[in-house]
Image (tube, coloured by chain):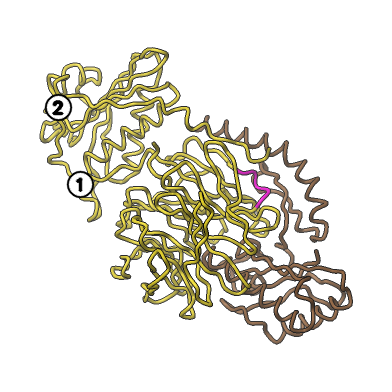
């Protein structure tokens, strides 16, 4: 009874998208990627000016303006886009789709991209949401899509639209139609209450998944399903658990004689890499196939070996170990052979998390009295520190491998989550109702 | 956004208020060996009143009996039993050997200046060091469980070396 705050996640998937052929429109000239391509690998100091007009709503509701608001907020939060002041918009929004954009008007106010849309009623109480994106400088339509969906699903439609705009302008896959699972914290440090919680990446639709009676830590998303793995101290036995987000069901992952911890899904979602204490003073890394329950040992070294994280191709595992006296990051093949150290800078290194793009490993570094968040290549080269705090920990990647989230703790003991661009720019706090730690970014929703 | 957040928050609160009392009743029997502080006082938000179970956070001067301290302390990133620790565990061993029906759990704890998963492993290493030393003094291995809380249950809510020294500890708890 205590774990049944289920999500009704499947309800909203009566959704489909239609790419509008350019022939449907007298002014569209097909999808183009032209003058406003943004290279986000170099770091952006000047966000691209966009004009996102209110979606004209003929359904009798406020869904149109609400969608425009969420699209605007998503794009602005990325740090790559800047919404122009709507008071400067010359052409009325309802004329844009009907007559085509007057590009000269939009150039005049400095817009480089223009977004317009409509919300109209569809059969069965559904809504039809259409939007178009134009490259103002080139005069081209870059995207045109329509979605038919239930009215209560408008937020996801807005995130999908923002993902399309982000993709067409930057060339990267979007990450707005995603969720964050994390640990909500409250109470004094000596008796901290920790609950699993989940929310949309923009903080909406927040809900608690557990009630705080068990200490829970380190939730991680299955990259292939609506499932998380985490650690719980339920019944005084610290073990790895699985949580099905569609049914709300929790189950322990296997029966082991000692503590199991530090779980993380393999890229295909079919197995979990985790750490197991056996014989007391050492921990080794194992993999458990969730269907067959077959367990295989990946490390066998008398030291602390933990924090396993697969490369996105599933061929290698990054982990941390103190086998060389202090906590450092290592990489081994997925069958456990060829372990080799990759972190050689000053300080201690932990929490390796392989980017979904495969090109980088995020980590936590402890040096002196400070914690740092950084990235390095899988061969250990190119170390770059992108954030610093008295305590900073727990990196997780957005599914496009361009944005990281993590938590920071101030000297006041409060923990808050932040997102940051890979370049180290655009650090922003993720707003949560309570203190927050151990974020895990979901894959793009289906 | 605020409305939907508020709605789910209130729902969660209602569930907590309903289940909280039941869980409190269960835990009071399951955890009777824990000290009074281990039952917790609730969250600072005034909303969550979830009970606590199975931890020994928040206490700094526990004793198993008069002149038998319940804990030993560790150096930074170390699981070595100090001279003071050996003296404490010697007293614990004598006290335990005269009470053959008692079972104990040794909790391993860390300070906050490490990463979460590493500290879970380090805490287990500390608990095992305490266990092994007690066994070397003749306490039956079968009577000793270990558990690591990593950095999750500090004895002292502080952010300086004085607090961290008290939090890097192994605590013997009678089951």
Instruction: Say which chain is yellow.
Output: A
Using the rendered image, report if marks 2 and 1 lie on a common chain. Answer: yes
**What's drawn in magenta, residue-wise?**
A210-214
Q: Viewed as shown, does residue A87 lie left or right of A405?
A: left
Which mark sits nearer the N-terminus, 2 or 1? 1
Spatial distance from mark 2 to mark 1, Cα to Cα?
Answer: 23 Å
The mark total stands at 2
**Residue at x 64%, y 66% (from the top left corner):** B148
Crowding at label 2, few (<14), some or many (≥20) Cα neighbours within 10 Å? some
Q: Quadrant of residue B72?
A: bottom right
**Residue at x 70%, y 44% (from the top left corner):** B49
- List the residue tagged with mark 2: A105
Circle 1 sits in a helix, a strand or a loop, which is it? loop
Q: Chain B is shown in which shade?
A: brown
Looking at the picture, how far across and down is residue A406, in whole percent? 45, 55
Up the image or down, A79 lies above or below A28; here it is: below
Q: Nearer the viewer, residue A275 or B62?
A: A275
Q: Nearer the viewer, residue A389 or A271?
A: A271
Residue A189 in the magenta stretch? The answer is no
**Residue at x 27%, y 40% (from the top left corner):** A166
Q: Which mark is residue A38?
A: 1
Q: Nearer the viewer, residue A168 or A249?
A: A249
Looking at the picture, how far across and down is residue A43, in whole percent? 25, 54
């Amino acid at each position: 009874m205590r774990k049944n705050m289920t999500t009704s996640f499947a309800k909203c998937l009566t959704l489909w998208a239609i790419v509008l052929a350019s022939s449907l429109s007298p002014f569209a000239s097909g999808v183009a990627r032209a003058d406003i391509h943004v290279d986000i690998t170099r770091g952006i100091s000047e966000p691209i000016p966009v004009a996102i007009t209110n979606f004209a709503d003929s359904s009798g509701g406020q869904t149109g303006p609400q969608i425009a608001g969420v699209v605007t907020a998503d794009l602005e939060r990325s740090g790559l886009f800047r919404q122009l002041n709507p008071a400067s918009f010359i052409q009325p929004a309802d004329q844009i789709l009907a007559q085509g954009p007057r590009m000269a008007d939009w150039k005049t106010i400095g817009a480089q991209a223009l977004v317009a849309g409509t919300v109209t009623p569809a059969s069965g109480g559904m809504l039809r949401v259409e939007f178009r994106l134009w490259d103002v400088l080139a005069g081209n339509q870059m995207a045109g899509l329509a979605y038919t969906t239930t009215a209560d699903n408008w937020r996801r439609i807005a995130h999908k639209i923002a993902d399309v705009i982000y993709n067409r302008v930057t060339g990267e896959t979007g990450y707005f139609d995603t969720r964050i699972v994390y640990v909500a914290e409250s109470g004094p440090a000596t008796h901290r209450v920790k609950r699993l919680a989940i929310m949309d990446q923009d903080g909406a639709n927040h809900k608690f998944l557990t009630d705080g009676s068990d200490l829970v830590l380190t939730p991680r998303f299955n990259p292939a399903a609506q499932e998380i793995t985490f650690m719980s101290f339920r019944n005084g036995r610290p073990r790895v658990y699985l949580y099905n987000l569609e049914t709300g069901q929790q189950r322990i992952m296997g029966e082991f004689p000692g503590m199991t911890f530090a779980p993380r899904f393999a890229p295909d979602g079919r197995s979990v890499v985790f750490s197991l204490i056996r014989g007391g003073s050492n921990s080794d890394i194992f993999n458990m196939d969730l269907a067959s329950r077959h367990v295989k040992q990946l490390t066998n070294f008398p030291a602390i070996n933990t924090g396993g994280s697969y490369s996105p191709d599933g061929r290698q595992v990054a982990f941390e170990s103190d086998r060389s006296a202090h906590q450092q990051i290592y990489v081994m093949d997925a069958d456990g052979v060829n372990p080799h150290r990759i972190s050689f800078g000053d300080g201690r290194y932990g929490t390796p998390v392989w980017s979904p793009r495969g090109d980088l490993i995020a980590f936590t570094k402890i040096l002196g009295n400070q914690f740092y968040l950084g990235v390095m290549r899988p061969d250990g080269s190119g170390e770059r520190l992108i954030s610093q705090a008295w305590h900073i920990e727990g990196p997780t990647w957005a599914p496009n491998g361009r944005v990281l989230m993590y938590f920071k703790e101030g000297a006041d003991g409060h923990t808050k989550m932040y997102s940051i661009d890979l370049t180290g720019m655009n650090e922003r706090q993720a707003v949560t109702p309570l203190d927050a730690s151990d974020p895990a970014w979901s894959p793009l929703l289906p | 956004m605020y409305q939907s957040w508020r709605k789910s928050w209130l729902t969660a609160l209602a569930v907590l208020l309903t289940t909280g009392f039941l869980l409190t009743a269960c835990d009071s029997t399951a955890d009777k060996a824990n000290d009074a502080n281990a039952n917790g006082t609730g969250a600072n938000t005034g909303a969550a009143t979830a009970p606590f179970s199975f931890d020994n956070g928040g206490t700094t001067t526990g004793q198993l009996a008069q002149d038998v301290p319940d804990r030993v302390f560790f150096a930074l990133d170390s699981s070595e039993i100090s001279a003071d620790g050996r003296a404490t565990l010697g007293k614990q061993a004598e006290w335990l050997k005269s009470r053959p029906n008692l079972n104990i759990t040794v909790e391993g704890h860390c300070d906050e200046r490490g990463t979460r998963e590493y500290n879970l492993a380090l805490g287990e290493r500390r608990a095992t060091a305490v266990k092994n030393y007690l066994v070397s003094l003749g306490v039956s291995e079968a009577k000793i469980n270990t558990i690591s809380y990593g950095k999750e249950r500090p004895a002292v809510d502080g952010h300086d070396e004085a607090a961290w020294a008290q939090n890097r500890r192994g605590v013997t708890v009678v089951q």
